[in-house]
Image (tube, rainbow, N blue to C red):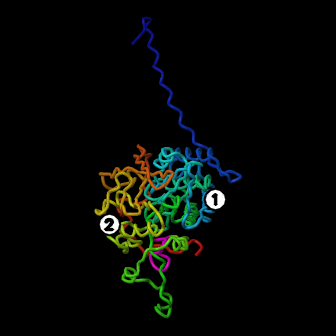
C-alpha cells in the first residue's frame, strides 16, 4: 500500500527476539566448606537450568569434576559416621517427611521439596533410597539431596536403596550417565559415587515407633558351618543351599542389623553377610512366614505374621518401605497396585506395613505406549505419636525436559527381576 504522496509504507519492524537466558556461573565449593540455604537454593536453580538448557556432556562446564568430588567427600564423611540404623527423634514441635524412590526424576524431587516444605528446624526428612537409575538426572538428584544432608545433617537422613550399588547402576543407567556427562573423568567420578553409596545407612527408627528401610525386614545373622562341620575345597567359599536357607530362616533383630557390614559395592546374596541384601531387596507377601525371594534372586518375602512379629518384638507401630513401583506391582496380583504412590500391604494387631513410592509417571522411559501414569507420594508423620501417616500424592512435573535414556529400557526388565547374581560385586572399593 502507498501513502497519498506515493511513498511506500515503511516496513513493519520485527519484534526483537527474547535474549537467551545467560548460563549460570560454574558452581564453586565454599572455601570454608560450609553450605548455606542460599547456596543450596542457587545450586537447585543451577541444576534445573542445566537439565533444561545444557547438553549432558557440557555439564562439567558448570559442575566440575573437582566440585562433585568435594561434595561427595563432604557428604560421605557425614554418612560414614552414622550407624546402620539412624535414630530420628523429633521434638513435639517437629514433623517428619518420609520419601520413597525418586529414580533420577530431578524436577519431581524439586517439586516434592517445595510441596512438603523444605528441610528445616521444624521439618525432618527421611529418604528411603533409590535416588539414581532409570531417570535422566540421577547425578543431579543425588547431588542435590547430598547438599541438603551437608547443610542439615541432623534434619535430613538418606538411606540406601538397592539401586545405590555397582550392579544396578551398571545395568539401569547411572554408570553410563556419569560417563556421558564427565567423559574422560567419568570413571573417577563414578567411583566416588560408589564409595558414597557404601556409606549410606540401611534403616531408620523414627520417634521410637516407626521403622523405615528400602526393602524391609531381614533374616537373623547366618552362622556358617565350621571347617570341621563343612569342609570346602581350597579356594571355594561355602554357599548355603536354598534348602538349608528355607529351613533355617528366622526373623532378624535390630541388634543384628546394627552389626551388619554395609560397606559393600553390592549387597551379598551368599555367605554370612546377608542382612544388607535383605534390607534392600525384600518384598512383602500375603502368604504367612519367611521365604526366599526367588523372583528377585536375593532378599526375602515375608507375610503379615512376620510384620506382626517384627512390630511386637521391637515395640513399633509402622513399617515404611519402598522398592516397588507400578511396574513391579503390575506383575504382582496378590498386592494392591501403585497408582497413588502408596499402599497399605499389611494391617495387623500392632500396626501397619506401608509401601511408599515417590517417582510419579514412572519409569521416565517406557517401552510401551500405555504409560503407568502413576502418582508419586510422600507422607508426613506428626506429633504427638508420629505413627499416623498423612499421605500426599502428586503428579509428575510436565513437560519434562527432553532427554535420552542411559540404558536400554526396551530390553532391561523394569522391576529388577532375574538379576545376574554372578555379576554382582560383594567387595568394597578398598578390597
Residue at point 51% right, 51% down?
383
Residue at point 36% right, 61% down?
347
Magenta: predominant secondary structure element? loop
Q: Nearer the viewer, residue 10 or 187?
A: 187
- Residue that label 1 marks: 74
The location of residue 150, given as percent across then percent down, is: 61, 55
The location of residue 63, given as percent across then percent down, is: 59, 51
Residues at marks 2 and 1, CA–CA distance in whole angstroms: 42 Å
- SS at mark 1? helix
- Kindly indicate the quadrant of the structure image that contains residue 416: bottom left
- Kindly indicate the quadrant of the structure image that contains residue 306: bottom left
For the magenta stretch, what is the residue range?
266-277
Mark found first going from the N terminus, 2 or 1: 1
* Residue situated furthest bottom in the rendering: 228
- At label 1, counting other C-alpha atoms closer than 10 Å, the crowd grade (few under 14, some 14-19, many 20 or more) is some
- Kindly indicate the quadrant of the structure image that contains residue 33: bottom right
Q: In this view, does 238 lie to the left or right of 374?
A: right
* Residue situated furthest left in the rendering: 333
- SS at mark 2? loop
| Numbered disc in front, either 2 or 1 | 2
Residue at point 49% right, 54% down?
386
The quarter of the rendered structure image containing the N terminus is top left
The quarter of the rendered structure image containing the C terminus is bottom right
Residue 184: assigned label: none
The location of residue 28, given as percent across then percent down, is: 65, 50
Amino acid at each position: 500500500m502507498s501513502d497519498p504522496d506515493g511513498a511506500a509504507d515503511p516496513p513493519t519492524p520485527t519484534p526483537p527476539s527474547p535474549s537467551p537466558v545467560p548460563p549460570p556461573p560454574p558452581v564453586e565449593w565454599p572455601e570454608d566448606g560450609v553450605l548455606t540455604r542460599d547456596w543450596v537454593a542457587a545450586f537447585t536453580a543451577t541444576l534445573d537450568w542445566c537439565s533444561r538448557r545444557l547438553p549432558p556432556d557440557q555439564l562439567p562446564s558448570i559442575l566440575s569434576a573437582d566440585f562433585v568430588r568435594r561434595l561427595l567427600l563432604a557428604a560421605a564423611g557425614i554418612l560414614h559416621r552414622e550407624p546402620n540404623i539412624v535414630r530420628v527423634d523429633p521434638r513435639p514441635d517437629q514433623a517428619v517427611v518420609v520419601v520413597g524412590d525418586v529414580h533420577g526424576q530431578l524436577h519431581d524431587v524439586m517439586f516434592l521439596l517445595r510441596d512438603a516444605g523444605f528441610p528445616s528446624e521444624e521439618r525432618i526428612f527421611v529418604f528411603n533410597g533409590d535416588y539414581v537409575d532409570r531417570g535422566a538426572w540421577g547425578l543431579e538428584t543425588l547431588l542435590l539431596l547430598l547438599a541438603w544432608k551437608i547443610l542439615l545433617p541432623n534434619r535430613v537422613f538418606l538411606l540406601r536403596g538397592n539401586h545405590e550399588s555397582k550392579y544396578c547402576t551398571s545395568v539401569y543407567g547411572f554408570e553410563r550417565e556419569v560417563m556421558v556427562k564427565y567423559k574422560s573423568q567419568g570413571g573417577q567420578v563414578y567411583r566416588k559415587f560408589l564409595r558414597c553409596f557404601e556409606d549410606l545407612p540401611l534403616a531408620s527408627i523414627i520417634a521410637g515407633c516407626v521403622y523405615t528401610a528400602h526393602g524391609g525386614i531381614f533374616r537373623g545373622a547366618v552362622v556358617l558351618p565350621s571347617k570341621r562341620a563343612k569342609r570346602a575345597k581350597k579356594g571355594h567359599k561355602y554357599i548355603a543351599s536354598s534348602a538349608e536357607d528355607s529351613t533355617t530362616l528366622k526373623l532378624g533383630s535390630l541388634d543384628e542389623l546394627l552389626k551388619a557390614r554395609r560397606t559393600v559395592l553390592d549387597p551379598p546374596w551368599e555367605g554370612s553377610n546377608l542382612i544388607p541384601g535383605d534390607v534392600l531387596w525384600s518384598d512383602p507377601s500375603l502368604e504367612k512366614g519367611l521365604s526366599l525371594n526367588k523372583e528377585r534372586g536375593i532378599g526375602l518375602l515375608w507375610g503379615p505374621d512376620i510384620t506382626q512379629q517384627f512390630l511386637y518384638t521391637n515395640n513399633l507401630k509402622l513399617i515404611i518401605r519402598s522398592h516397588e513401583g507400578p511396574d513391579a506391582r503390575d506383575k504382582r496380583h496378590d498386592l494392591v497396585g501403585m497408582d497413588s504412590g502408596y499402599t497399605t500391604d499389611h494391617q495387623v494387631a500392632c500396626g501397619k506395613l506401608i509401601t511408599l513410592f515417590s517417582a510419579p509417571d514412572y519409569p521416565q522411559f517406557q517401552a510401551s505406549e500405555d504409560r503407568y501414569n502413576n502418582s508419586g507420594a510422600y507422607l508426613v508423620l506428626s506429633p504427638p505419636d508420629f505413627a499416623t501417616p498423612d499421605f500426599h500424592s502428586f503428579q509428575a512435573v510436565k513437560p519434562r525436559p527432553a532427554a535420552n535414556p542411559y540404558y536400554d529400557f526396551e530390553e532391561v526388565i523394569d522391576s529388577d527381576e532375574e538379576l545376574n547374581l554372578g555379576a554382582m560385586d560383594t567387595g568394597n572399593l578398598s578390597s
